[in-house]
Image: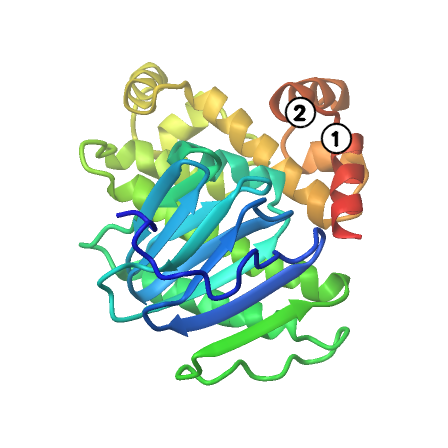
């Protein structure tokens, strides 16, 4: 589907929020609703469809969106979106914000071109749906949080329009935490259920152990013992099914965990390294730079400037 057949834009050149803000909303729009941004937006746009159908274009790349689909638009590229032609409505959650750098590893496999990422829901598995919608409700509530006080209740579920801007560090970080849960649940659910990529339960269990505590002193031997395989058999099976060794997967999980700690805590770089399972701060600095293109200290500083 394309947006070519949509009616004229309801808000021509509708500007996106300025960079640094976290804005979340819930819309239930009727045919004729469309937004066009010839210069794109300064922040990332996340959309998750509750029901109905939407149509989104980013640069020259287009996609439709149905229930359970997460569609993400990178900043700086012309885009447009609206109720898909022929659909009777489009109910969706959306969020404008600066994406955490560590989300790239989760969204990367779903890039379709021009900064458009499409994580299509598995129609046979609606398990994550309720939890994802609850995360958006929580994001909306946390965006409305007054300082460190208790947030007001979210808008009733039958509201057509609800929007909130997160003011203050506490509100922004809590709202981003909820959005990170959405990214993990959508991308993770699709990875587990993608046809043709069934993972051996023993390999999946090892993945879960790594993800649950990447800073633990995991080894090939300890992971193999947890799934009742010999180290050589386990390493061969893991690499054959996932295309990388267990230790490479562990290092990636540790780097992702370290990036998250740098973004959300004031721990020193040395303590972040230790908490993420790196025995040597020097080694941690080297592999972190290789993975993210900048040393840990600079990564934290850049993130703080975006959130300021």
Query: Which residue occupies the foreground of this view, 294 or 1?
Result: 1
| Residue at figure coordinates x 71%, y 32% from the top left | 273
Crowding at label 1, few (<14), some or many (≥20) Cα neighbours within 10 Å? many
Query: Which residue occupies the foreground of this view, 174 or 205?
Result: 174
Report which residue position mark 2 lands on.
288
Report which residue position mark 1 lands on.
296
In the picture, measured across the screen, residue 285 lies left or right of residue 14, that is right
| Residue 36 pos. (x, y %) | 49, 54
241 lies above or below 119: above
| Residue 250 pos. (x, y %) | 50, 28
- Figure quadrant of residue 235: top left
| Residue at figure coordinates x 52%, y 43% from the top left | 78
- Mark found first going from the N terminus, 2 or 1: 2
Secondary element at image label 2: helix
Q: Are marks 2 and 1 in contact (CB under 8 Å)?
A: yes
Crowding at label 2, few (<14), some or many (≥20) Cα neighbours within 10 Å? many
């Amino acid at each position: 589907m394309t947006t070519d057949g949509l009616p004229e834009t309801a808000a021509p050149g509708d500007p996106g929020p300025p960079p640094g803000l976290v804005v979340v909303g819930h819309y239930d729009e009727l045919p004729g609703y469309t937004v066009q941004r010839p210069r794109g937006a300064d922040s990332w746009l996340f959309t998750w469809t509750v029901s109905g159908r939407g149509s989104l274009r980013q640069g020259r790349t287009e996609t439709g969106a149905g229930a359970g689909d997460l569609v993400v638009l990178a900043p700086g590229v012309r885009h447009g979106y609206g109720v898909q032609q022929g659909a009777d409505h489009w109910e969706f959650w959306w969020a404008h914000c600066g994406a955490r750098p560590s989300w790239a590893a989760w969204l990367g496999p779903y890039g379709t071109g021009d900064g458009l990422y499409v994580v299509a829901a598995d129609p046979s598995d609606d398990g994550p749906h309720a939890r994802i919608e609850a995360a958006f409700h929580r994001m909306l509530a946390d965006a409305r949080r007054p300082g460190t006080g208790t947030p007001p209740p979210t808008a009733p579920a039958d509201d057509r329009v609800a929007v909130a801007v997160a003011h203050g560090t506490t509100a922004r970080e809590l709202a981003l935490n909820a959005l990170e849960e959405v990214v993990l649940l959508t991308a993770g659910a699709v990875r587990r259920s993608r046809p043709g990529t069934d993972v051996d339960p023993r390999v999946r269990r090892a993945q879960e152990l790594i993800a649950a505590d990447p800073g633990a002193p995991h080894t090939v031997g300890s992971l193999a013992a947890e799934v009742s395989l010999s180290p050589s058999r386990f390493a061969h099976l893991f690499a054959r099914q996932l295309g990388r060794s267990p230790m490479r997967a562990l290092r990636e999980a540790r780097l992702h965990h370290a990036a998250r700690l740098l973004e959300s805590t004031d721990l020193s770089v040395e303590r972040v390294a230790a908490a993420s399972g790196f025995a040597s701060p020097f080694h941690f600095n080297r592999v972190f730079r290789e993975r993210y293109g900048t040393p840990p200290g600079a990564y934290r500083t850049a993130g703080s400037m975006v959130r300021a």
